[in-house]
Image: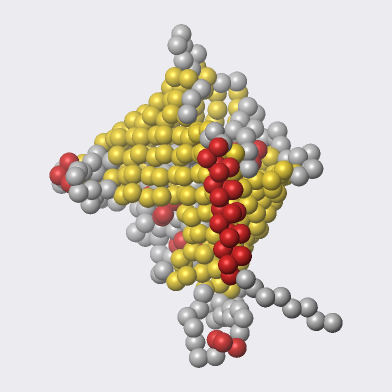
């Protein structure tokens, strides 16, 4: 027996218009609620060469905003944007050629409640819930931030992305109600290797308890090939397959001793003549043991990050280094609590992790040392002021030494 049906274009258009009208009416009759974060900072950055007295000064400025709109119980949108300039564009303030405007995320999330879980379907553009930042964990579990105090950034809420996943695609996440577990998958397109388009498939698993937090991603990527002579014979043609993976894990919580472990691997080729070759720009890690004693905290950190991540950070300058952080939090005053801290950072200039351990010539190695006291003042639960002073001795073992001075003040408001 054979069944036949005739596709009626007119009926399809009517159904599409009706569905769109119902969807639009549901949003128009809903009362949306808005929340978000707005932040801004301005500073002075100067470098003085000790051999000839030459100096270079700039006024970096940055603005960041993250917004969420809840239209219904099942439909939410997110947006994150950044405006930044390495030097305040006094001579170019109207044309804006020296300033950077970047959209970090645009997303629409549809949620659906089930008996024992909640399901999230997303359409997004940008760097969506990047691994290494606390964004995904905070959205799914409402946890406190676990990222390092060294990971202060002017371009996201907190944390350092462990690999680049900027692109556009869809995702599905399921969060269990009776266990602190969320997992799902992402399918997205992004640009790799000089602007070539790549198709990615990622799996994500996250767990959050009082003493253990983990966010893990593993995925495969393949370049989208240009149409060739015989491509009509294939549904999918994969020439090069690469692996990317990463983990963001924290043992403990903000009130006890803890250990932060982060590691990322990007663009590991799995086939062909370049298989299993690793470039230093594709490896990142951040290790930080934490010791707590009442209001005193001591962190010891070691890191190797990509240049792209370092450029977005407030305290770090080089890709490879180590640091010790000492801070006193919840210092009570008559009006508001204060946090006082200091970072002592030692780093290696112009060198990646594979250069350091790969037998490269280390005769011309350049060490940098930075001392960075900072203060955070919480005016309320939703607003705080931060300022820092960083004094650095650059190239400490060679004759071309220089001093670096950086002062940054910023304000953040949650609404």
- Where is 384 relative to 228, above or below? above
Quick one: which residue is furthest to the bottom in this view?
Answer: 229
Residue 189, percent across and down?
52, 64
How many numbered marks does the figure carry? Answer: 0
Judge left or right: residue 363 versus residue 50.
right
Colouring rule applied to residues: secondary structure
Quick one: which residue is furthest to the right in this view?
Answer: 1
Residue placed at 68% from the left, 54% from the top? 184
Q: Is residue 35 visible?
A: yes
Residue placed at 41% from the left, 55% from the top? 307
Q: Which of the two residues, 140 or 218, is positioned nearer the viewer here?
A: 140
Residue placed at 31% from the left, 49% from the top? 100
Q: Which of the two residues, 338 or 64, is positioned nearer the viewer here?
A: 64
Residue 171, percent across and down?
61, 55
Residue 116, percent across and down?
79, 43
Q: Which of the two residues, 371 or 247, is positioned nearer the viewer here?
A: 247
Residue placed at 55% from the left, 37% from the top? 29
Q: Which of the two residues, 12 or 243, is positioned nearer the viewer here?
A: 12
Residue 232, percent across and down?
56, 87
User: If the image is split into quadrants, where does the N terminus sit?
Assistant: bottom right
Q: Is residue 289 visible?
A: no
Judge left or right: residue 57 versus residue 71.
left
- Where is 396 relative to 184, above or below? above
């Amino acid at each position: 027996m054979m069944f036949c049906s005739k596709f009626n274009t007119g009926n399809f258009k009517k159904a599409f218009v009706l569905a769109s009208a119902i969807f639009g009416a549901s949003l128009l009759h809903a009362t949306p609620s808005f929340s978000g974060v707005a932040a801004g900072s301005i500073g002075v950055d100067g470098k003085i060469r000790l051999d000839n007295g030459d100096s270079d000064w700039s006024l970096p400025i940055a603005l960041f905003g993250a917004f969420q709109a809840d239209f219904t119980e099942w439909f939410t949108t997110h947006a994150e944007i950044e405006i930044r300039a390495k030097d305040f564009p006094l001579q170019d303030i109207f044309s804006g050629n020296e300033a950077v405007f970047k959209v970090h995320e645009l997303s629409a999330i549809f949620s659906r409640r089930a008996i024992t879980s909640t399901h999230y379907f997303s359409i997004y553009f940008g760097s969506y819930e990047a691994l290494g930042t606390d964004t995904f964990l905070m959205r799914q579990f409402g946890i406190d931030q676990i990222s390092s105090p060294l990971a202060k950034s002017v371009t996201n809420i907190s944390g350092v992305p462990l690999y680049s996943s900027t692109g556009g695609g869809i995702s599905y996440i399921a969060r269990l109600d009776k266990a602190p577990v969320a997992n799902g998958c992402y399918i997205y397109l992004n640009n790799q290797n000089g602007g070539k388009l790549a198709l990615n498939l990622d799996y994500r698993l996250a767990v959050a308890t009082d003493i253990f937090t983990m966010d893990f991603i593993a995925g495969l990527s393949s370049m989208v090939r240009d149409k060739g002579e015989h491509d009509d014979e294939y549904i999918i043609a994969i020439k090069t397959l690469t692996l990317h993976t990463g983990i963001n894990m924290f043992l403990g919580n903000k009130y006890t001793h803890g250990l932060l472990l982060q590691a990322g691997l990007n663009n590991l080729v799995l086939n062909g003549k370049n298989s299993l070759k690793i470039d230093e720009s594709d490896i990142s890690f951040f290790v930080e043991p934490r010791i707590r004693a009442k209001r005193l905290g001591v962190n010891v950190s070691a890191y190797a990050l990509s240049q792209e991540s370092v450029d977005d950070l407030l305290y770090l300058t080089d890709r490879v280094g180590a640091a010790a952080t000492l801070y006193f939090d919840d210092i009570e005053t008559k009006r508001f609590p204060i946090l006082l801290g200091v970072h002592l950072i030692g780093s290696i200039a112009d060198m990646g992790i594979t250069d350091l351990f790969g037998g490269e010539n280390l005769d011309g190695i350049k060490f940098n040392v930075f001392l960075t006291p900072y203060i955070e003042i919480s005016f309320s639960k939703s607003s705080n002021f931060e300022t820092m002073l960083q004094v650095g001795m650059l190239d400490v073992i060679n004759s071309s030494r220089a001093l670096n001075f950086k002062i940054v003040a910023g304000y953040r408001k949650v609404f």
